[in-house]
Amino acid sequence: MELFTLRLKPLEPLMLRSHGEFDPSSRGVFSHALSLVLPRPSTVIGMFISTLMSLEVLSLKYINIHSWDELLKYYEEILDNLGIEAIRGPYISRHGHVYVPIRFGKKFMLVDYEQVRYFLLKHPDYGNVLEKFFSDVKDEHSEVLDALKTVESDLKRYELRVFEDQRVGIHLKLRGGRESLKVAEEGYIYVASHVSYPLDTEVVSKLIVKKNTRLKELLNKRIAVKLGGEHRVTRLVVEKLNSLKDAEDILNKMNFNYALLLTPMPLKKDDFDHIRFIGECDIMGFGYSIAKRCRKPLQPAILEGSILRVETSQTLSIDELLRYGLYSALGLCRKDYEILGRIGYASYIPLTLD
């Protein structure tokens, strides 16, 4: 196997739609479109597949898809066709630092990964606050919650601040005649909140590929792509790393008790009973099909930035880790989670002392 890096550098503010449809007619809350801070795996792989089709690396047969199950089947077929074992991420890279999502309840931040490890696991004033939080010692619970609030406050010093770019839009229609004119249609006005990253910020994903992958013809080329809603211009670069060491360290490291989610972890309702975490659970949408004019499924998920307690002593194979992500470490190696894991859902980074 080989390790490729997929680097996305936004060249303008992005609209990374959160769940729910957006209606531009001025009827209250529906006229306000909000952007997520990080693109989710569905956005990244959708952009990547569209780009590969425009470059004629992939066949146009993947356009005619009529259901969610059929789409997941095509995702699996496309990954096999391209020689991609798995996609992991995304996370943020800037000036040599890696920024990961973290949330305490509904508070969401992008923070330097090394600082997250330090404050949660080995800060002299807090010790391993995660171990205390997940312990069953009830009389220390309020003390631990106070420590977590202090950690949250301290981490703000190492936060990557993204900006909200608000824009007002109107709905235009054509007025016929010898010279057609565009005029504003009454009753249609909306506010769109885009996310704007600081300069020199890249959105990075890791691609673990087979040595005969078809992606080699894209290496080190700068490609202009359209990312997210409103097709905002972004620069894409695919690079090959000389060593698999970083990937192998993460994939083989099963001596960790906590995992930080880089992307949401969709789950069936019954699977929540055995999972302990700090963060937020919500209903997550997989996007909206403009071509089919229908919403893709909604599913409960533990959101990116949440910290999960991992209690497993079993030895997992590389294949399981590649195909299922964190699902495998939680003993959830089921077929319905496999393709979600391969395209990047349940991507994680271990929180360890070493």
Image: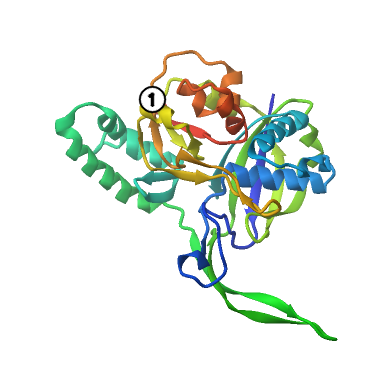
User: Number of callouts in the render?
Assistant: 1
Which of these two is toward me, 208 or 59? 59
Is 301 situated above or below 256?
Answer: below
Q: Is residue 98 visible?
A: no
Dot 1 amino acid type:
Asn
Which residue is at the far bottom?
A: 178
For image coordinates 55% across by 36% down, the residue present is: 345
For image coordinates 44% across by 35% down, the residue present is: 260
Q: Secondary structure under badge 1?
A: loop
Q: x%, y% of residue 12?
A: 63, 63
Is 184 situated above or below 303?
Answer: below
For image coordinates 61% across by 19% down, the residue present is: 319
Quadrant (top left, top right, bottom left, bottom right) of the N terminus: top right
**How many residues crowd around disc 1 within 10 Å: few (fewer than 14), some, or many (20 or more)?**
some
Which of these two is toward me, 140 or 200? 140
Corner quadrant of residue 113: top left
Quadrant (top left, top right, bottom left, bottom right) of the C terminus: top left
Is 76 situated above or below 320?
Answer: below
Give the labeled residue for mark 1: 257
Is 267 left or right of 176, judged from the image as shown? left
Q: x%, y% of residue 46?
A: 68, 45
Q: x%, y% of residue 98?
A: 51, 43
Is 90 left or right of 55, judged from the image as shown? left
Q: Is residue 254 visible?
A: yes
Which of these two is toward me, 128 or 226? 226
For image coordinates 57% across by 49% down, the residue present is: 39
